[in-house]
Amino acid sequence: MTQLKDVFTPDALAEASPTEIPSAPAPRAPRASLLRAIGTGLSAGLLALIICLALAVIVVPRLTGSTTLTVLTGSMEPKLPPGTLLVVKPEPIDRIHVGDVVTYEPNPNDATTVISHRVTAIRVGTDGSRVFTVKGDANNTADAPVQSKQVVAVLWYSVPLLGWVNTWVGGIGSGWLIPAAAALLLSYAAWNLIAGAREQARRRRGHGRGRRRAASA
């Protein structure tokens, strides 16, 4: 009598001896990851903007001996509307050209009042002295002739809207506020760097634990 032997197919063997496969960690919710990425991007952008503004408004003028002024009228519209912050610095008279925006004292006896208008013409005297014709971009007529001794600075660069902030700071006294603002900005930057480093370290630890679990399984 012929004895029949059991025949096992590969599928049957697989069913008879199942192999335990470690379950992969559940993926993070895509919405939470997206919100975290957006938050990180906004925070980095805000930090970069704050640093740039601090450099332009506080650090650079202090280091270069420049002066910050605020446009109060519409005489230089549309390029320099009211509220624009002007950063002006002294410049040799012979380096001032037509098209430059100069800051001058209309009354030599009153150093507290200055005007920033564009040079439209320069007349050089036989003795080398210079007389400037200046005019606001939005004005129809030129100002009174400006002598070299009246010119105190030339426009270096401008920042829209921040002039109002500059006026407010000057009104309450900038002796303590500007250093305090700089300290706060630097603290905010340091906090963001530390938070970013901690997040990166946490992610690396999480990936390392995931690889060790997969290897031990």
Image: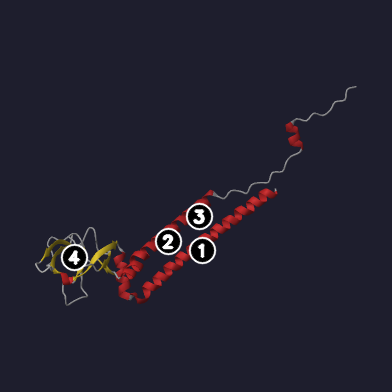
Q: Disc 2 to disc 4, how far (Cα)?
A: 40 Å
Q: Which residue is mark 2?
A: 47
The colour scheme used here is secondary structure
Q: Amino acid at mark 2?
A: Leu
Q: Position of residue 211 (x, y in %)?
A: 64, 50
- N-terminal of the pair, mark 3 or mark 2, is 3
Q: Nearer the viewer's eye, disc 2 or disc 4?
A: 4
Q: Which residue is mark 4?
A: 94
Q: Position of residue 70 (x, y in %)?
A: 26, 67
Q: Disc 4 to disc 3, how far (Cα)?
A: 56 Å
Q: SS at mark 4?
A: helix
Q: Which residue is mark 1?
A: 194
Q: Disc 1 to disc 4, how far (Cα)?
A: 50 Å
Q: Sort mark 3 into few (<14), some (14-19) or many (20+) by Cα contacts within 10 Å.
A: few
Q: Position of residue 37 (x, y in %)?
A: 49, 53
- N-terminal of the pair, mark 2 or mark 4, is 2
Q: Which residue is mark 3?
A: 36
